Amino acid sequence: MKTIKSIFGLLFLLTGLTFLSIPPYYEWQQGKELRALEKALNLLTEESTDDIDLSEIENLSFSEEQLKKVLELEIPSIDLKQKVLAETTEENLKVALTQLKKNQIPGKGNFVIVGHRGYRGDRHFRHLPSVAAGEKVYLHTKKQTYVYEVTDLEVIKPTDVEILNDTENKNEITMITCTVTGLERVAVKGELIKMIAK
């Protein structure tokens, strides 16, 4: 009887350790993909595109065309500076923030960015709920920086899709992530206040 209890105890312990190791493993894997993405983007920025062989970069799952569409989002108040991929897919969301609407143009209409809340650390939109009205958000492209001022933060239902719509005569940014429970969404909106040429 004592041996059976010991075996069950050991099995429960091993099962618990397995479950505890899953989030760190995914973060480690995503970190490799993110480092590959950043390395490829640096190569595209620094060198002539004729000389680049992206196939030599391990763990890179993006084409050169996809990489040329990558933007960067910066929110100084929460120390966030992250890549924004052009398409929202489950794979892309694991690595970075993503644009939700197709064919969005920075500085025009309602530019929507989504991201996971993240398990730990500062990756993704973990600290997005801490952003307050009046704080600045910077969306960087290769040629310009779009500066937005945060106007509103609200918790919405996943079905409240009207938040994605353009507002007449307004150029906005909307950033969305999950609440801690995952049952609702945190949406932070900002209005475009200026554009800075690089």
Image (cartoon, helix red, strand yellow):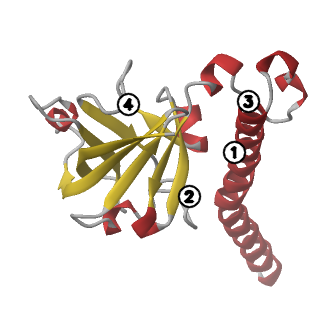
Disc 1 marks a residue whose amino acid type is Leu
Cβ atoms at labels 2 and 1 below 8 Å apart: yes
The label nearer to you, 4 versus 3, is: 3
Disc 2 marks a residue whose amino acid type is Arg
Position in image of residue 35 (x %, y %): 75, 46
Q: How many residues crowd around disc 3 within 10 Å: few (fewer than 14), some, or many (20 or more)?
A: some
The label nearer to you, 2 versus 3, is: 3
Q: CA distance from mark 2 to mark 4?
A: 18 Å
Cβ atoms at labels 2 and 3 below 8 Å apart: no
Examine the image and state in which quarter residue 131 appears: bottom left
Q: Earlier in the sequence, mark 3 or mark 1?
A: 1
Q: Earlier in the sequence, mark 2 or mark 3?
A: 3
Q: Which mark is residue 123?
A: 2
Q: Given the current orientation, which residue lies at the most extreme left position?
A: 168
Q: CA distance from mark 4 to mark 3?
A: 24 Å
Is 70 situated left or right of 18 in this image? left
Cβ atoms at labels 2 and 4 below 8 Å apart: no
Q: CA distance from mark 2 to mark 1?
A: 11 Å
19 to 115, vertically: above or below: below
Mark 2 residue element: loop
Q: Which mark is residue 34?
A: 1
Q: Earlier in the sequence, mark 4 or mark 3?
A: 3
Cβ atoms at labels 4 and 3 below 8 Å apart: no
Mark 1 residue element: helix
Residue located beneath label 3 in the image: 44
Position in image of residue 17 (x %, y %): 72, 68
